[in-house]
Amino acid sequence: MNSEAEKISSVPSGDPRLWPIATVMAAGVFATTFVQLQGLGYLPFNHLLTSMGLDSDKSATFFSLSMLPWTFKVVAGLIVDGVPLFGSRRRIYLLLSAITAVAMWLWMGLAPSNYNMLLILAIGMNTAIVFGSTTSGGLLVEAGQRFNASGRLSSLRVFAQNLGAAIGLPVGGLLATYALGWTSLAALLPLLCMFTAAWFWLREPPLPPAAAHGRSAMAQLFHVTVSIWTQIKNVLRWQMLLPALLLFFIQAVPTFRSTCFYQYQTIELHYSDAALGWLGLAGYGVALLSSALYAWWCRKASLRTSLYAAIFLTSLSALPYLFYTAYEPYMLRAATIEGVGTFLQYLAYLPLFDLAVRSTPKGSEALGYSLLISVWNIGLMIGGKIGPTLYEHALNKNMNHLIWLNAGVTLAGVILVVLIPKALVEKREGN
């Protein structure tokens, strides 16, 4: 055990084997963020659903249902880790994810007025990119644990995620008032970049003999069953319970960052979709700096210290939105609010993603990480639904009350940080 730890700690941070993997991982995260309904599709779909007469609560239901595949990300992780395709546990899944997502987006562009068809296709598209995102997460955990670089690779992941959102939102805002087919075409380029990166740069080591071809169908089935069961046992460990609860809680807090805020901005404050797109660019553009900051900070402080800061910063990130005002030329106040709020939010998320990497068992990288991110997404879906419901039916459409509620409840997450085992959070990266 000690020799293995020494071997890992002796790997140089600039090892040339790390960066091709990191590049493919980042390309996968960027593409699967850019094309999400929370990215490129956020403003076009909000505009479309509002024009169909849906209030923020009903629009939130559409987004929540379309996000259902993200709550089952653990199933994708189980398949990616336990069921190799054509001798591949990573590369083939990335290629198939990109191709399928392209097909779903093109099909959505042909059915913009059919609510049920749009919902089915949105679920299908999300299912495809869940596999791409899950595989990218598996690459992150493998490289992060192998090269002792979980904090830096988590920072790269969030940088790619914020870059995808920073570009996707303004593009979506510019296309929101046009036919949905134009948004579909805009989704193609990042997905093709993901396909190209996986095709040319991802090289996987040969699978062990037990995974080789040439066995009978029954033997193949038996091997897959044993492999899946092994993966399940590997992730059912106490070390993942408290991190999972913390990730869930942070996202399940009733949030204003949902369909209700879109309708508040467009109906009450008179912002256009294009204006919201540029504000998204301002917010996520500034948030890119959080990745560089945490890549430096994770080597200076213990993860527990960073997690305490994460709870405080998550709560603090809501408060700038109390000062939103009606649309004004140049949008300097709104851009500042979006920049500060989004920067603080994603700086707070980085220690949480770092915790997810550290909590994931070796040998089940895609499954373990996807299980934790599934819990995160379930919380996101719940918080994204509860917030608009309270806004419409309990808070009399008072946005400031919802913002204060979000900030106050978030602080209770400190209790979960106290309970996380020392083995996971007492060390800083590089120790």
Image (cartoon, rainbow, N blue to C red):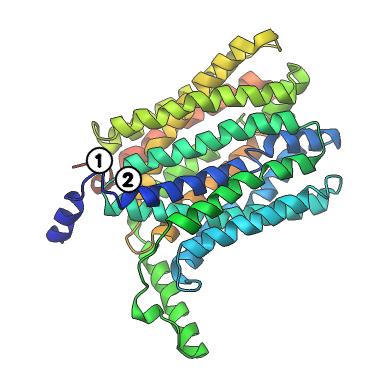
Q: Is residue 238 above or below residue 265?
A: below
Q: Nearer the viewer, residue 33 or 243?
A: 33
Which numbered tag is attached to residue 113?
none
Taking the image as shown, residue 3 lies to the left or right of residue 355, namely left
Q: How far across and down, in percent of the image, does residue 185 sit?
A: 72, 44
Is the residue under label 1 in contact with that under label 2 (CB below 8 Å)? yes
Q: How far across and down, in percent of the image, does residue 59 sit?
A: 75, 39
Query: Residue at 69% of width from left, 34% of height from top?
Result: 172
Which numbered tag is attached to residue 429?
1
Q: Nearer the viewer, residue 24 or 261?
A: 24
Q: Residue furthest front?
A: 200
Query: Residue at 28% of width from left, 47% of height from top?
Result: 424
Q: Amino acid at mark 2?
A: Ser
Quarter of the rendering containing residue 64 = top right
Q: Amino acid at mark 1?
A: Glu
Q: Nearer the viewer, residue 207 or 247?
A: 207
Query: Residue at 45% of width from left, 35% of height from top?
Result: 159
Which type of secondary structure does the marked residue at label 1 adopt? loop
Q: In this rendering, does residue 242 appear at all?
A: no
Quarter of the rendering containing residue 235 = bottom left
Q: In this rendering, does residue 330 appear at all?
A: yes
Which numbered tag is attached to residue 150?
2
What is the spatial separation of the Cα atoms under label 2 and label 1, in whole angstroms?
8 Å
Which type of secondary structure does the marked residue at label 2 adopt? helix
Q: Residues within 10 Å of mark 1 (few under 14, many from 20)?
A: many
Q: How far across and down, in percent of the image, does residue 373 sit?
A: 48, 49
Give the quadrant of the N terminus: bottom left
N-terminal of the two: label 2 or label 1? 2
Taking the image as shown, residue 41 lies to the left or right of residue 405, namely right
Q: Is residue 176 above or below residue 19?
A: above
Give the quadrant of the C terminus: top left
Query: Residue at 57% of width from left, 35% of height from top?
Result: 165
